[in-house]
């Protein structure tokens, strides 16, 4: 079903030639030098200077985006990672000292004082933070770190096993974990765990290489540890690392007990004396949700759902389909995971994921579509610092969309019982995700606050942490596999400390859904669009306020939202 035949086209450049080849450093450097030398004689010229910097940044960002997209779509082709790494090393890394000069040029301009308004106060804080953290000696370290991260993604994408008479990626094993035959589930879980065990030593060595680089970056920036360095480099102005420790405790004390109740219910319904790791995904009613048969059906129904929530949303995803900006199916050689990658110059994003015919694929598509709507809403923002929303905000956009679309999931599920089941799973998984989120974050806190640890000490801490948040699964006899679980989490390798934002945003999305149910669709969607359009022109706490919710992850607030989920689940019985 198509709501539009329109395709997305890249707008004309305002300040730079359409023929400018930014894959050649001499061309980019020439433009950067012009910007450094540019005379600024008024407040308006200062803003125009920022817009020029933003346009050039968009051009470089989009070239890097396409190289990253190609690298992940065809991760088994070494040339693609080489092309990405070369551009990052030759263009992106070499540009960084110039962007530091641009920040100083803005900050030292006498006309900056004439820029009044809350958004410019916020801009001052963003740019002064960037100036404080910049160290030229960190640029080659960051380039090396990026290459190692890409190596992890490339090698993970190549992990396959033989099962059911076929070679399968680790993602393609997921449907078997829903099988009613417990023996099949155990076989598949064990097969996946053994494959990672084969890579255990190598991935640990790779991580330790990255850890050394990261610790050196922090020391260069005069921080005592990498955790605090990353907290500041992510611009986390609205909360402290100690606040995150309290968040971990809140989930442990308020969410984990509720999940243990659900685990007891699962154990009883499955007729088991104990839950094992391979028992956590199987459907309690013995019926696996199979929402689509083809990728075409998958995307068309997703478009229809978004159109029903708000016509503009459906049309945006439709335009992406028409423009070849979707790669959704799982296949050999494709990197794991899913993402929405903004194409900054085009003003639209690309969605990448690994669909294998499970309900979770629907949630992923709609999640990434929330990111996509954010990309569309901010496409006309001209100042670079305002375009890059922090993850606490970006993930609120995506996770809220999961909940806004729930009432339309009947497009995938004609059977009323299946429809209710999908909604129940969504609510349960929203809370079920939080313990793992805390584990990933707390693990990284410990790793970088105790940098001299051994691999065994790291393993031991991870296992103890996992047990702290354990919601009723028996791991006896699986200790060797359990210690490897963090190796599956690409964020720890590729984007360190980017994960706790999912937890914050999950709380925010539940609060948005509560508003959707209690204050109405129209008001909540208006608040949603209002916060999307802000980009990063105001602090995170102000953006959440614009969305009509609190930026809060205290124990009291977590308990409040757990109670809301409990009530919603009662309605779906």
Image (tube, rainbow, N blue to C red):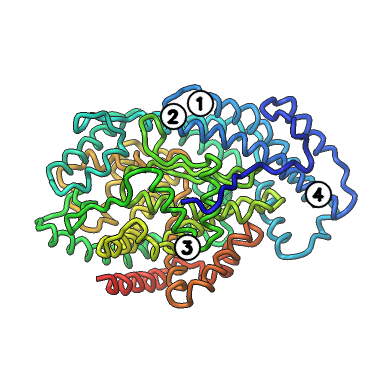
284 displayed left or right of 558: left
Q: Name the residue beneath numbered marker 3.
A: 308
Q: Earlier in the sequence, mark 2 or mark 3?
A: 2
Instruction: Name which of mark 1 and mark 4 comes first in the sequence.
Output: 4
> Marks 1 and 4, how far apart in space?
36 Å
User: Disc 3 to disc 1, how far (Cα)?
Assistant: 38 Å
Asked if marks 3 and 1 touch (Cβ < 8 Å), the reply is no
Say left or right for 144 vs 356.
right
Q: Secondary structure at mark 3?
A: helix
Q: Give whichever of 231, 282 is nearer the camera.
A: 282
Residue 377 place in picture, x, y as percent: 61, 56
Q: Secondary structure at mark 1?
A: helix
**Residue matched to label 1:** 80
The reply to whether dot 2 and dot 4 touch (C-beta < 8 Å) is no
Q: Are marks 2 and 1 in contact (CB under 8 Å)?
A: yes
Question: Camera-side residue: 348 or 477?
Answer: 348
Residue in the foreground of this view, choosing between 510 and 111: 510
Q: Position of residue 81 (x, y in %)?
A: 50, 27
Q: Is residue 416 left or right of residue 275?
A: right
Which disc, if any, is residue 305?
none
Q: Residues within 10 Å of mark 2 (few under 14, many from 20)?
A: many
Q: CA distance from mark 3 to mark 4?
A: 40 Å
Mark 2 or mark 4, which has the lower sequence index? 4
Crowd tier of the residue under label 4, counting other residues whose Cα lies within 10 Å: few below 14, some 14–19, many 20 or above: some
Whole-number angstrom distance, CA of label 2 to CA of label 1? 7 Å
The residue tagged 2 is 75
- Mark 3 closeness class: few <14, some 14–19, many ≥20 residues within 10 Å: some
| Sequence-earlier tag: 3 or 4 | 4
């Amino acid at each position: 079903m198509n709501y539009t035949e329109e395709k997305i086209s890249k707008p004309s450049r305002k300040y730079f030639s359409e023929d400018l080849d930014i894959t050649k450093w001499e061309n980019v450097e020439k433009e950067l030098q012009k910007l450094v030398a540019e005379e600024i004689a008024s407040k308006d010229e200062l803003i125009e200077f920022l817009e020029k910097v933003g346009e050039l940044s968009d051009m470089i960002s989009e070239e890097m985006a396409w190289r990253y997209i190609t690298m992940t779509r065809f991760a088994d082709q070494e040339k693609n990672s080489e092309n990405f790494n070369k551009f990052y090393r030759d263009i992106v890394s070499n540009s960084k000292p110039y962007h530091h000069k641009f920040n100083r040029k803005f900050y030292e301009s006498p006309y900056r004082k004439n820029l009044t308004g809350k958004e410019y106060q916020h801009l001052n804080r963003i740019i002064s933070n960037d100036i404080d953290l910049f160290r030229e000696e960190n640029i080659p370290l960051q380039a090396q770190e990026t290459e190692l991260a890409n190596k992890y993604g490339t090698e993970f994408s190549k992990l396959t096993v033989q099962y059911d008479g076929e070679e399968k990626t680790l993602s393609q094993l997921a449907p078997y974990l829903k099988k009613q035959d417990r023996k099949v589930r155990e076989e598949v879980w064990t097969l996946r765990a053994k494959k990672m065990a084969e890579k255990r030593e190598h991935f640990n060595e790779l991580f330790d290489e990255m850890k050394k680089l990261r610790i050196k970056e922090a020391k260069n920036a005069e921080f005592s540890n990498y955790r605090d360095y990353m907290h500041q480099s992510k611009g986390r102005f609205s909360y402290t690392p100690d606040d995150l420790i309290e968040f971990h405790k809140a989930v442990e004390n308020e969410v984990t007990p509720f999940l243990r109740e659900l685990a007891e219910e699962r154990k009883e319904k499955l007729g088991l004396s104990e839950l094992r790791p391979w028992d956590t995904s199987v459907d309690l009613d013995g019926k696996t949700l199979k929402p689509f048969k083809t990728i075409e059906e998958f995307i068309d129904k997703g478009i229809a759902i978004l159109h029903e929530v708000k016509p503009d949303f459906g049309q945006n995803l439709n335009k992406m389909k028409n423009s070849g900006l979707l790669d959704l199916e799982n296949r050999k050689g494709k990197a794991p995971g899913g993402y929405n990658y903004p194409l900054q110059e085009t003003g639209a994003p690309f969605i990448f994921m690994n669909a294998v015919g499970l309900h979770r694929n629907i949630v992923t598509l709609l999640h990434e579509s929330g990111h996509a709507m954010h990309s569309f809403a901010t496409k006309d923002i001209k100042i670079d610092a305002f375009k890059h929303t922090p993850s606490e905000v970006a993930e609120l956009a995506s996770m809220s969309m999961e909940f806004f679309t729930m009432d339309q999931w009947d497009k995938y599920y004609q059977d009323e019982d299946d429809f209710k089941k999908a909604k129940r799973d969504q609510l349960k998984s929203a809370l079920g995700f939080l313990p793992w989120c805390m584990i990933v974050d707390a693990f990284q806190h410990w790793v970088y606050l105790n940098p001299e640890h051994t691999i065994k000490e790291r393993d031991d801490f991870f296992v103890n942490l996992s047990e702290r948040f354990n919601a009723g699964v028996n791991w006896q006899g699986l200790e060797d596999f359990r210690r490897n679980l963090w190796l599956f989490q690409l964020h720890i390798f590729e984007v360190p400390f980017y994960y706790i934002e999912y937890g914050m945003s999950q709380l925010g999305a539940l609060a948005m859904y509560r508003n959707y149910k209690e204050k109405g669709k129209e008001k909540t969607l208006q608040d949603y669009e209002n916060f999307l359009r802000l980009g990063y022109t105001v602090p995170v706490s102000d953006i959440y306020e614009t969305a009509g919710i609190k930026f809060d992850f205290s124990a009291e607030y977590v308990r409040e939202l757990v109670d809301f989920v409990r009530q919603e689940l009662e309605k779906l019985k």
